[in-house]
Image: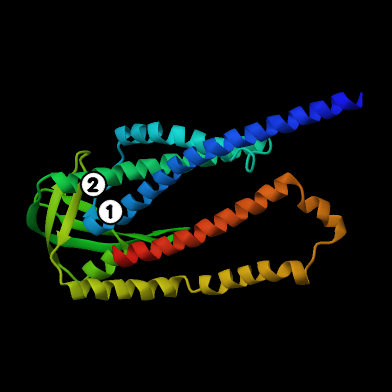
Amino acid sequence: MYVPVLSKASRILVTKAKRKESSGQSVGFAGYILLAYWIFFAIIHLTIDLFIDLYTDKDYSIAFWWAGAVALPLAACTSYLTRNSLFTGRYTDVVFSLIILGLYLGSAYFTTLKLDLLISAAVKPEKEQVFPVKTVRRIFSPKLGFIQTEVALAYPNQLVTFKGTRTSYFLLRPYQALRVKTGRSFLGSDYVTHISVHEQERWAARWAYVKDWFHRYYWLMIVLPLFFVFELIKDKYFPASPANTSITKRPFKIVLKRLLVIILTLFCLFMLVVLLFGLFG
């Protein structure tokens, strides 16, 4: 009776090893695909402000369907790769699946809109015109703060409201009229590829934005270092009691801790990207 048990255990170990080896190969190939997507996403959103100064952003159903076609396989691939670390129960399966799908759907949708502007600016003709500036104002989000600039230009027959970077607010607010090069994208969005201002004014606007950013987010310079210092010293000065040891080892608690680390890391990267977007846009 002892030999069959060992044989069964051996077969289980061999099966697990084969599965691990095959999954490792699939993770490598699929991981490159996901990495390529996020690199492409970063390139598009970083370069849009280098080539497009102002643009109108409309909602298009065709862009949503394209985004869905891209997001569904990528979300399925990500869910498959993270099935052992994030998906530990019935409820977490549903929650994390929806989060992953929403993340890819939103990123693919906005990437489609930005890609339309970049391609149109590269291949379509433009006109250089002078438009009166009606308003230049900052747009605030209840959770994110200063997110973008809204510039209203008086076209001959209508008032067109453009979106711009955070730096655009400090650059354009003194102007009553602007000489710009404009065009219209394939999806119908209006865009401005060039604003006739001096380069010194652009650098002055960037510096004004940096000072404004640090003034609004000074609390980050206090909270984040304190949090990371606490994480470094808590095991030494605040060790877990034996009664809580079993609780901290629960899979759900481990998943929450990993999710917290991921959220904080993404938050820090997001704040850095926000600063860079406004600085170099």
Judge from the rendering whether residue 245 lies leftward or rightward of residue 57; answer left or right. Answer: right
**Split into 4 quadrants, where in the image is the C terminus?**
bottom left
Disc 1, disc 2: CB below 8 Å? yes
Residue that appears at 61% across and 36% down: 21
Judge from the rendering whether residue 96 lies leftward or rightward of residue 217; answer left or right. Answer: right
Task: From the image, tell me which residue sits under label 1.
Answer: 48
The answer to which of 58 and 81 lies nearer the viewer is 81
**Split into 4 quadrants, where in the image is the N terminus?**
top right
User: Residue 156 at what x, y percent from top left?
Assistant: 8, 51
Judge from the rendering whether residue 72 lies leftward or rightward of residue 84; answer left or right. Answer: left
The answer to which of 221 and 215 lies nearer the viewer is 221
Label 2: which secondary element: helix
Judge from the rendering whether residue 115 lies leftward or rightward of residue 95; answer left or right. Answer: left
Task: From the image, tell me which residue sits under label 2.
Answer: 117
Q: Residues within 10 Å of mark 1 (few under 14, many from 20)?
A: some
Residue that appears at 40% across and 43% down: 37
How far apart in space, not on screen, are marks 1 and 2 (Cα)? 8 Å
Q: Residues within 10 Å of mark 2 (few under 14, many from 20)?
A: many
The answer to which of 175 and 76 lies nearer the viewer is 76
User: Residue 186 at what x, y percent from top left?
Assistant: 19, 39
Residue that appears at 40% across and 71% down: 213
The quadrant holding residue 65 is: top left
